[in-house]
Amino acid sequence: MYSLVQVELYKIFKRPRTYIAFGAVAALIGIIQFGLKLDGKSYLDFMLNDLSSSLEIDGKILNGYLVCYVMLQLLLVHVPLLIALIAADMISGEANMGTLRLLLIKPYSRTTLLLAKFIAATIYTLLLLVWLAILALFGSMLLFGTDDMFLLKTSYVVLLKESDVFWRYIGAFGFAALAMTTVASLGFFLSVFAENSIGPIVATMSVIVFFTILSTLNIPIFNLIKPYLFTTHMIGWKEFFDIKVNASNEAIIGSIQNPEKIIKAALVLFLHTIGFFVATVLVFRKKDILS
Amino acid sequence: MKKCSLFVLFVFSASLAFAQDAAQLIKKVKAKLELVDNYEATGIMKTDIAFIKAPIGKIKIYFKKPNLFKIKKEGGISLLPKGGLSVNLSSLIASSNYSTIDAGLQDFGSKKLRVIKLLPNEESSDVVISTLYINEKESLIEKAVTTTKENGTYTMIMNYGAYSNYGLPDQVVFEFNTKNYKLPKGITLEFEDNSKPLSAEQVLKNKKGRVEINYKNYIVNKGIPAAIFN
């Protein structure tokens, strides 16, 4: 199995398109960091317009932690599209190149081969997230420094102590890894049905875009189906940055407002991942590779 | 007619006497506060604003005559009510360009406090009226309600301890009005937020803010570099 995963990883990283995702993430993060470094004050003034009429806010608000959060909000919606580029090509790419039959001649079961491919796609996904974390979190910490995290939500503001932030990012990236693995498993599943890469890549992107729009639309009729869409739960990482308060409205350091939401979202994503993978195995085991 | 004139004269002289008493009392309070040229103190600040989730923060407080006042959070972001200068007592009665009105005695917990209203004489002053609740025996301001043109009404409640000789409180509770906070979802990118609309009671609560500062370790009249207030 180990050697199979190695081979699959070699195939992934041999392809130039693999590096498109890493390049795109670096470019996007670089642009945002550059913009905020140059004109972050205007951005902050705009964000704090409502608050600063009644409060004096003092301190380094635009620090690495806030910048990383802003970037994650923007990027974690689009990173799935970059993951689809690779995951949706895992099987269809082989079919397209005519190497699928050759691959299945090997003395491994179809399930083992699929598992190796899926593990390789997951490793690629995790590496992309690590890359994102290095640039967005550590890069921003280096560029903007660190301080308390002042988070502006729609109807309230959260102030997290500097010492209470880093572990939340570890949790958030861990959760994002699970969410992105679900996307990879969807792409992987769709790639069984096609003989070329474009179809499953576009299909995966379409499903994500379609479901994300449904998840974000605040129309009551869609609220019924939202809990069943995995895209609704992909933003569960944000819950790590909401803090509980006690009866005196003092934030409880080290707490999370809705840990049960994170657990539920993680469970839904995990079940989707397993579901997509099992479905892939079931379809692929019966797939006619001779035609 | 004679009786009536006498009565008017009595009322006028009585109110003049009260006004003089009030001015004297303010003078005594001011004299006590003027013992302090500068101070530095550490403290703990609790912010209780309905739409802000903030932890208790350690702060440093600096004051220098006549009205330089600064609160610095130790390595972090601090939130203070706008017009935070009013957090210090000296600035309330720093000027002598105001008229005093004695509003009698009022119960405040177990104490009876003298209520004095200060009306600034200057048209340009941001303060419209300050009501001071003064402990006559100790010459200490225990409560102050200040209405401003720009920043609404503030209430300060002071508790005194070891530094009452200098008129420096151990605890200040600062209550103020806040504006409703709401950011569009398009800015916060929180499209998933399905929070229910607030009740009238919650909306009212959201408009009140409270900051509590517990002072510790005053260092009085040991000098403070002016650069701290920049």
Image (cartoon, coloured by chain):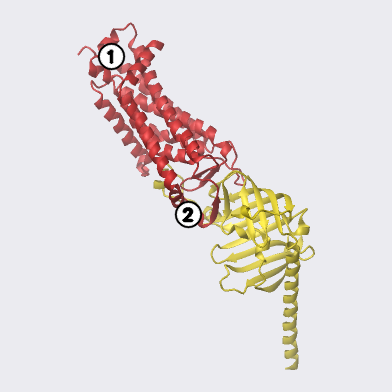
| Residue B177's disc number | none
Q: What residue lies at 33% left-to-right and 25% top-to-bottom?
A: A18
Residue A207, located in which quarter of the rendered image? top left
Q: Tag 2, which secondary structure?
A: loop
Tell me what hue chain A is rendered in: red
Instruction: Give the image location of residue B77, x and y in percent.
Output: 56, 46
Q: On the picture, is A12 further left or further right than B221?
A: left
Chain bearing tag 1 is A
Q: Position of residue A135 (x, y in %)?
A: 44, 33
- In the rendered structure, the answer to whether residue B153 lies left or right of residue A48 reads right
Q: Is residue B88 above or below residue B54?
A: below
The disc at residue A50 is 2
Q: Nearer the viewer, residue A281 or B60?
A: B60
Q: Which residue is mark 1?
A: A286
Q: Is residue B213 left or right of residue B28?
A: left
Q: Residue at x 78, y 58 (%)?
A: B165
A250 vs A138: above or below: below
Residues at marks 1 and 2, CA–CA distance in whole angstroms = 60 Å
